[in-house]
Every structure is written in structure tokens, then in C-alpha cells.
Amino acid sequence: MKMLVALVALLALVGSAMAWDLSENLQYTLVKNGFEQAGADKVLPQVENTQSGAYFYEPDATYGEAWGVVTNQLGDVVLDRNTLDDACRNPAYSAADNNFYVTLTQGGSASLSMSAKDTITKDSEIVGTAKAYQNLWVGGEFSQLSATFTESKAIIGFQDIDPASYTGPETTNHYVVTDTKNAVATVDGETHAAGYFNTANTGVQVEAGLDQNYVGSGWAEPTYSGGITMWANFAGACDPHCANPIMTSVTGSAGTGLLPANTQEFASGTNNQPGWRIGDTHYWGTNLDTPNLQNA
Amino acid sequence: MRKILIIMISMVTLAGLSIGATQTSAFTNSFLVSSFSEVAASRTISESSVTSPDLNYISHGQVDSYVIQPGGGAATISQTIESTAQNYNGLGGGATFSSKVTATDVTNSYIIMKGTSTAEVCNKQDNSKIKSQTFGMGIAKPGEGEYSFEVNGAQKTTSDMVLALAPIVDYTKLLDKELIVAFEQIPTEFEQTPDILQQEVNFNYATSNNQPTYYGYDFTSTIAVDDTMCSSSMSLSHINY
């Protein structure tokens, strides 16, 4: 008789687990390519102040209403194609003789998987990650580039969590957010008349993570993670001043934490993107009017 | 006790075995090419129905796409609707909607996709035959310029159910499902008319074992203006395990 009860219980458990497990996966990219023939100087406005992002919202997630948000914005870009530096030294290149290229890539991903409470396996019941990134590549001869990445933000988590599903300090909202503001990447061969660049690659990436396991008869302490990565690379010629230094720098800071405060609601609190609605999924991008999407 | 256990295990095993299954698939494609038109619009409709001793299935899908080209431009619109259903280990199936647009001199574009599927796992009315019907239609509004338009489609239904005048299986409880899905792109307006617009949307969903298991879409777009080209993409998937 015990075996029969165990068999029925096992079947019920399998059925229950299948009904609870779900995952959300979101990805987006925006790539903008600009080209100008030699002598022109209209490339940077084509990519400056570009912003894009995407989010998902699942109202019927296992432990609450699930959100994943990734956004990016590029601000000002300063590129010096002057043939004379401040000391009137003359690097051996000419903007008038070289075509110029620029590629801005903005993108992100967010995933959140939820499974039924299970003390049999060590796998976490809630695993979420979000990543936002942007990269600016320029090609053509130039002596200095400075890019300001106005914002990159990654958010993953829940709101309106069922109080019955957790213990401990009460909170109905549970997001991990990593946000960076005005991160600057610079490559500079002009200040010390070190030469010129053919290409430069600069960018920033932020990440946020959430991991929580159900052990014994309750939830383990959640694990939050986050970070920022920046880069500024170049390739070029040192003619005619190979002994002089080339300077590269990246400056930026990011914070990872829980947002918003417990009493705030996500949809009306931290975002200001127009057109957001409860229960849908959006993609947005500016400049050239890339379209918005929604699933109704 | 031992007999009860054996009977229980036998029942579980029996439930996992198929006593016959019916599966069906249908698709409708349309392709519009227009030139020097101020508007290019296409609607593709696909309907499919199957009646067999173990499955009643009806699906309806529609894809609309349009672009407005006030100064006259060229456009191609390719649309596809595919739907599948089967009664094997429970109701399952899905649908895919696709729209691919390439156009010049566009100021507005719009895509909408709708689908409805209804299925039940047995046919009380007639167990002596399998009947399948399909309907595909394309509607084009190519404007004043020259154009070409084509529509094609197909349906295939297979079943290994034994046909009989009497019910083979006496289902005491009918299992039926209705699923409605829709995808709508917010209409896009361009402040600066792009030289070329290319965009593609694929929207699909799947069901298995009587439950929705998946929905998602992917979107790609390329817009070219002068010496600037902007490409964007997005994908979303929702999976129930």
C-alpha cells in the first residue's frame, strides 16, 4: 500500500513541477553604421544620442510578476581629425584623404527562469541574468576619440511577490539593478603628438544577476551579482613620433542593488519610457525611427 | 495489494500508449511585388479544419502588412502562415506567422498577425470518415504601378485511427481547447524617409499535452538613409516546461 501511495505522490509531483517551470528569454541589438567620404565631417551626428532598449514583463510568473529590462544610451562623441595638434605639430595623416566609418552597437539580454520549489536537487529555483552593452567602433585616420556612454542599465527581478512564497523581511518587489551613468572612454594620440589611429573600439557593459535556492523548508539567502566592464582599444601608426605616449582611459562607475524601494511599483516608479504598458513587451530605438513592437 | 499495484502500473503504462493518432498541417504563402506605387498592402488568410474520430480541429490565421510610399516606390511583401495539430499524448500543435517586407521610399509601415485554434480530442458525430478542408487567400493592394501577386498553399492530414461506425473509445469527458494569439506592431512613422526599409517578423506558438508550452517572436529591421544604415533585432521567448 505504501508503494501505491508513493507512486501516486510521485506522479502528482511530476505533474506539479511541469506546471510551475517556465523561462523568459529576451534579446535585442541595434547596429548603426555610418560612412563619410574623405573631407566630410558628418559622421558622428549619425550615432550621437542614440538610445535603445527592450524589456519583458510576465504577469503570471511563478513567484510574482517578472521583469527584465535592458537599456543603453550613447551621449556625445568627440573625434579630432585636425591635422595639427595644440603645439602645431603635424601628424602625418589627412582627414581630407581618408574615408571615415563608424559603427555603434547597442544590445542586451535578459533571462529569468523559475521552477517549482524542490529540495531534492541543488539547482536554484530562481535564476535571472540581465546584460546591457554598447560598443563604438570608428575607422579612418584620426588623432583622438572620446565617447560618453550616457547610460547602460540592466534590471532583473519580480514585483508583487506572493507573500506566501517567502519568509523574512517583507518586500513585494525584488529587483537587481546595475546602472552606470556617463562612463567615458578615450583614446588619445594627439596630446603628445604620438601619431594617429586607424581604428578605435570603445564600450561599456553592465550585468545584473539574481539567484535563489529553496532548501529545507524555506528560501536560502538570495545571491545578487553585478558589475561593469569598459574598454578602449586602438590600432594605428606612430609616425612620426613613436617615442611619445598614447593615452587611453576608461572612467565609469556602476552600482548594483535592489530597486526600487519596497513601496514603489516598478511600472510607475523608475522608468520613464513612453508607451510602456502593463502586460506587454517593447523594443525601442531612436534616430532613424526604428519601430516599437508589442504583443497584444 | 500486489494485484492493485500491478493494475495501477498497467493503467499508467496503457495511458502512455497511443491508440491511434491524427496529425495535420497546413500552410498558405503569398508574395507581392509592386513598383512605383504609393501603397503596398497584403493580407494572407489561412483556414484549416480536420474532423477525424479522435480530433476536431479548426484554425484561422491572418497576416496583414502594409507600407505607404507617398512618392511612389518599390516593395515586396512575403507572408507565410503555417499551422499544425496532432492528437498524440494529448493535444499539441502550433502556428507560425511570418512577414517579410522590403520597400523603398516608405513613410509608414504596419504589421499585424492573428491566430485562432480550436481543438477537441474526439468526434462524437461521425467515426466513419476523416474530413479535412483548407482555405487560403491573399488580398493585395498594390496601388497604381505594375505588380505581381501569387498565393499558394497546401494541407496534409494523416491518421492511423481505425474508422468505424461505432465509437472506438468512449471518452467520458471531452477535452477541448481554444487558443487565441495576436501580435501587433505599433505602426511606424518615419521622420526622414529611408531609402530602403527591410523588416521581418516571425511569430509562433506551440502547445503540447493540452497545455501552451511556448510563444515567441523575432524581429529584424534594416533602414538605410544616405550613408547611414541602422539594423536592429529583437527576440522574445516564453517557455513553459
Image (cartoon, rainbow, N blue to C red):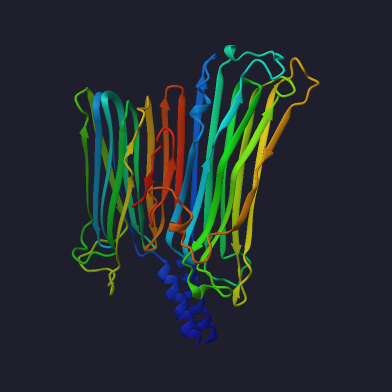
Q: Is residue B35 visible?
A: no
Residue A67 x, y percent position in the rendering:
48, 57
Residue B118 sits in quarter: bottom left
Locate residue A141 relative to residue B195 in the image: left or right.
right
Q: Is residue A267 left or right of residue B127?
A: right
Decide: is B91 above or below A76: below
A212 vs B40: above or below = below
Q: In the rendered image of this protein, does residue A208 appear above or below residue A103? A: below
Residue farthest to the front, as pictured: A87
Residue B135 appears in the picture as rendered: yes
Closer-to-camera residue (A136/A245): A245
Q: Residue at x 55, y 43 (%)?
A: A151
Q: How many marks?
A: 0
Q: Which sits in the foreground, A136 or A39?
A: A39
Residue located 46% across and 84% down the image: B4
Judging depth in this view, the residue of B32 and A137 nearest the camera is: A137
Residue B157 position in % (x across, y down) = 29, 50
Residue B154: horizontal and vertical position, in percent?
Answer: 27, 42
Give the image quarter of residue B171.
Answer: bottom left
- The residue at 27%/65% (across/down) is B122
| Residue B92 percent across, percent down from the top left | 36, 58
Drawn side of residue A136 relative to residue B85, left or right: right
